[in-house]
Image (cartoon, coloured by chain):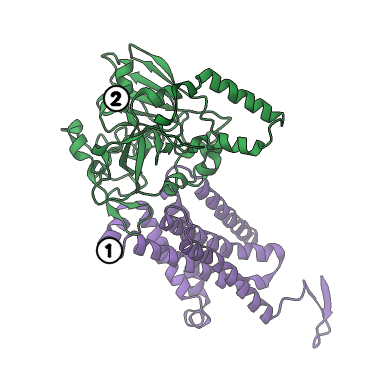
C-alpha cells in the first residue's frame, strides 16, 4: 500500500496502487478485442481450409454458442475480480467483454437462421414455438439486444444510472437461459452444459455473498 | 500389402490358419526382442490390418447408387463418428479407437436357436459372398451420408443357426472392454451397448451384417470388425463391434431406449412426421452439402419395408 501526500491536502491519502492510465486501459480493451476475434478467425480459416470436420455448419453453430457463454462468463467475472484483486479499473473492460459476447451470439443466431433455416421465417417461427431449447435460446438472444444497444455513454446519460442498471441485471437471466438452451439441446453427454452451469453458479454465489455481507 | 486377384494365388501358397498365426506370433516375439530390423514397419503393418482391402467383393446391382445421390467420402465416414465407448465427441473415436483390438474376435450366437455357436471373425468373412451395397445412412441427430457398405444379409447367418419358433427378436451386443474403451468410465449409456430387431426386420434383405466400407475392412471407429447396418432406421440401431447375437422371446431393452425412453424408441424407423422430443426430424444435413434436405419416410426404403409396419401407430411405436 503506497502512501502519498495529496498535493492540495495535507492529509495522507492511502491508495492501493496507481490505477492504470486511460491509454493503458484503452490498450487493454484492444487486446481483449483482438483475443475475442481469435475464435472467429479460427472458424473462418478452418472453414475455407476444410478443417472444420465433416459437418462444419454444426461445428460453427456450436462454437459460436459456446464462445457466447465464455464471453458472458468473462463479463460476469469482472466484478468479482475487481473486488478480489482490488482493481477497480477492470470495470472499464466490462463493456468490451459484454459486447464481444453479444457479437458471438449474433454470429450464432445468424448461422442458425441462415445455414440451418435458410431464412425461412415460417420454419423459424415453428422452431421457436415447438422446440423448447430454441424458445429459450431465442429469448436469451432477444433479451441480449437491449443490453447491447444501451452499452454506450450517451444512452446511459439519457436513461439515468438506475434504469440502465435495471436493464443490465438481465445479464443474469441471459446467462441462465443460455445454459438451459445448451442443456436441452445436448443429446446425452451433459458434461459441457454442467461446466458452464457451475461457472455461472460460482460467479452468482460470489455476488450473493457480497450482497449479504454488505447488507448486514 | 500387395493385393493379388484370387486367381493369382495357388492353393499350395495359402497357409493354414495355425501356420499363419504361429508365424505372426513368432514375428511379434522376434520383433519384441528387436531381432527384426524394420520394427516400425511391422507395427505399421499390424495397424494397417484394419485398412486392408476386402477381396472378392461384388457390387449388388439391387443396391446400387440411389438415383440423384452421390457417395460421401471415406474420410467423412472415418472422422465423424458416434461411438461413445471411445468418447462422446464426434472426433474422439477416430483417435481413441486406435486401441481397439479386432483380432482375435468372435461373435457368439446364443438363445432360442437350434445351432448356437461361436463364429470366428474370419469364418464370418466367408459365411456368404461379400456384397457391396450403397445405402443411405441417417443419424437420429439429423445428418446423413451415402456409404458403400460391404457385407451380406443377416438372414444368411440366421438361416445357419436355425432360430426356434419362440425366437421373436434378435439382440445385438457390442464389446464392452474397459481396458480398450475409455468411454466406458462414463455412465452416459448403460454398457454393454445393446440393440435389437424384430425377427422379420432381422430377416429382411436390407439388413446387412457389415464387415467393411469403401472396399476395405471397417475402420475401428466405425465398429470394426463387424457391425449391423439397418438403412431404414436411425443409425444408432446398427450396433457396432458386435460380440454377441442373441435370439430372444421378448423385445430387448436397447441402450438408447434405456437412456431416453421418451426420445428413442425400439423401432426408430426414419420418419419425418415423428419428431424427436427435442428436435425436428423433418429435414437432415447431408454431410458435404450446404443445404438441408427433406428427410424421406423410412429413409427412402419405404417400398421395401413399409409393409412390415402396416397398421402400426408409428407415433406410438417410434
Q: Is residue B37 left or right of residue A186?
A: right
Is residue A120 visible to the viewer in this orientation of the structure? Answer: yes
Q: Residue at x 25, y 38 (%)?
A: B61
| Residue B232, position as x, y percentages in the image | 28, 38
Colour purple, chain: A
Q: Camera-side residue: A52 or B127?
A: B127
Same chain assignment for discs 2 and 1: no
Please, which chain is the residue tagged with disc 1 on?
A: A
Vertical side of B97 occupied by B123: above or below: above
Q: Residue at x 56, y 32 (%)?
A: B180
Q: Looking at the rendering, which quadrant does residue A94 occupy?
A: bottom right
Name the residue beneath numbered marker 1: A120
Return the residue found at the far left.
Answer: B311
| Residue B250, position as x, y percentages in the image | 31, 21
Mark 2 → mark 1, Cα distance in angstroms: 45 Å
Q: Tally the marks.
A: 2
Q: Colour of chain B?
A: green
Is residue B182 visible to the viewer in this orientation of the structure? Answer: no
Which disc is residue B155 wearing?
2
Q: Looking at the rendering, which quadrant does residue A4 occupy?
A: bottom right
| Residue A118, position as x, y percentages in the image | 31, 63
Q: Camera-side residue: A131 or A209?
A: A131
Of the two numbered discs 2 and 1 in the rendering, the one whose residue sits closer to the viewer: 2
Q: Is residue A5 left or right of residue B80?
A: right
Vertical side of A160 occupied by A87: above or below: above
Label 1: how many residues lie within 10 Å, few (<14), some (14-19) or many (20+)?
few
Please, which chain is the residue tagged with disc 2 on?
A: B
Label 2: how many residues lie within 10 Å, few (<14), some (14-19) or many (20+)?
many
Q: Are marks 2 and 1 in contact (CB under 8 Å)?
A: no
Quadrant (top left/top right/bottom left/bottom right) for the C terminus of chain B? top left
Amino acid at each position: 500500500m503506497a502512501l502519498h501526500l495529496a498535493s492540495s491536502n495535507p492529509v495522507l491519502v492511502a491508495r492501493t496502487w496507481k490505477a492504470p492510465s486511460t491509454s493503458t486501459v484503452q490498450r487493454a480493451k484492444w487486446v481483449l478485442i483482438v483475443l475475442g476475434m481469435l475464435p472467429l478467425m479460427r472458424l473462418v480459416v478452418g472453414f475455407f481450409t476444410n478443417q472444420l470436420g465433416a459437418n462444419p455448419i454444426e461445428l460453427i453453430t456450436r462454437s459460436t454458442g459456446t464462445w457466447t457463454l465464455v464471453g458472458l462468463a468473462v463479463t460476469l467475472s469482472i466484478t468479482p475480480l475487481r473486488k478480489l484483486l482490488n482493481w477497480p479499473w477492470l470495470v472499464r473492460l466490462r463493456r468490451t467483454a459484454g459486447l464481444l459476447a453479444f457479437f458471438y451470439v449474433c454470429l450464432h443466431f445468424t448461422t442458425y437462421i441462415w445455414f440451418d433455416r435458410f431464412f425461412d421465417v415460417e420454419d423459424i417461427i415453428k422452431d421457436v414455438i415447438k422446440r423448447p431449447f430454441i424458445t429459450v435460446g431465442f429469448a436469451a438472444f432477444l433479451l441480449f439486444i437491449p443490453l447491447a444497444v444501451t452499452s454506450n455513454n450517451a444512452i446511459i446519460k439519457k436513461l439515468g444510472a438506475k434504469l440502465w442498471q435495471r436493464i443490465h441485471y438481465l445479464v443474469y437471466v441471459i446467462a441462465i437461459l443460455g445454459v438451459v438452451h445448451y442443456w436441452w439441446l445436448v443429446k446425452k453427454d451433459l458434461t459441457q452444459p454442467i461446466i458452464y452451469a457451475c461457472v455461472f453458479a460460482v460467479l452468482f454465489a460470489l455476488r450473493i455473498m457480497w450482497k449479504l455481507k454488505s447488507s448486514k | 500389402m500387395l493385393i493379388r486377384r484370387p486367381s493369382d494365388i495357388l492353393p499350395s501358397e495359402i497357409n493354414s490358419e495355425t501356420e499363419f498365426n504361429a508365424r505372426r506370433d513368432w514375428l511379434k516375439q522376434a520383433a519384441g526382442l528387436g531381432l527384426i530390423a524394420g520394427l516400425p514397419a511391422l507395427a505399421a503393418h499390424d495397424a494397417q490390418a484394419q485398412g486392408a482391402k476386402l477381396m472378392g467383393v461384388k457390387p449388388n446391382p439391387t443396391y446400387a447408387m440411389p438415383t440423384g445421390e452421390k457417395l460421401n467420402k471415406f474420410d467423412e465416414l472415418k472422422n465423424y463418428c458416434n461411438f461413445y465407448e471411445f468418447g462422446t465427441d464426434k472426433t474422439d473415436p477416430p483417435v481413441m479407437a486406435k486401441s481397439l483390438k479386432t483380432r482375435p474376435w468372435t461373435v457368439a450366437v446364443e438363445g432360442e436357436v437350434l445351432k448356437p455357436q461361436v463364429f470366428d471373425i474370419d469364418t464370418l468373412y466367408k459365411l456368404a459372398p461379400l456384397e457391396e451395397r450403397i445405402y443411405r445412412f441417417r443419424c437420429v441427430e439429423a445428418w446423413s451420408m451415402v456409404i458403400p457398405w460391404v457385407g451380406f444379409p443377416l438372414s444368411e447367418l440366421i438361416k445357419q443357426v436355425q432360430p426356434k419358433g419362440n425366437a421373436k427378436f434378435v439382440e445385438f451386443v457390442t464389446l464392452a472392454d474397459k481396458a480398450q474403451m475409455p468411454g466406458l468410465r462414463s455412465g452416459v449409456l448403460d454398457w454393454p451397448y445393446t440393440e435389437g430387431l424384430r425377427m422379420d426386420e432381422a430377416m429382411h434383405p436390407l439388413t446387412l451384417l457389415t464387415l467393411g466400407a469403401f472396399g476395405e475392412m471397417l475402420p475401428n471407429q466405425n465398429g470394426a470388425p463387424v457391425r449391423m447396418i439397418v438403412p431404414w432406421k436411425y443409425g444408432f440401431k446398427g450396433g457396432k463391434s458386435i460380440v454377441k447375437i442373441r435370439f430372444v422371446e421378448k423385445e430387448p431393452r436397447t441402450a438408447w431406449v434405456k437412456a431416453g425412453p421418451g426420445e428413442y424408441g425400439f423401432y426408430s424407423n426414419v420418419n419425418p412426421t415423428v419428431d424427436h422430443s427435442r428436435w425436428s426430424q423433418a429435414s437432415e444435413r447431408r454431410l458435404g452439402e450446404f443445404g438441408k434436405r427433406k428427410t424421406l419416410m423410412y429413409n427412402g426404403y419405404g417400398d421395401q419395408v413399409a409393409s412390415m409396419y402396416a397398421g402400426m401407430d408409428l407415433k406410438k411405436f417410434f
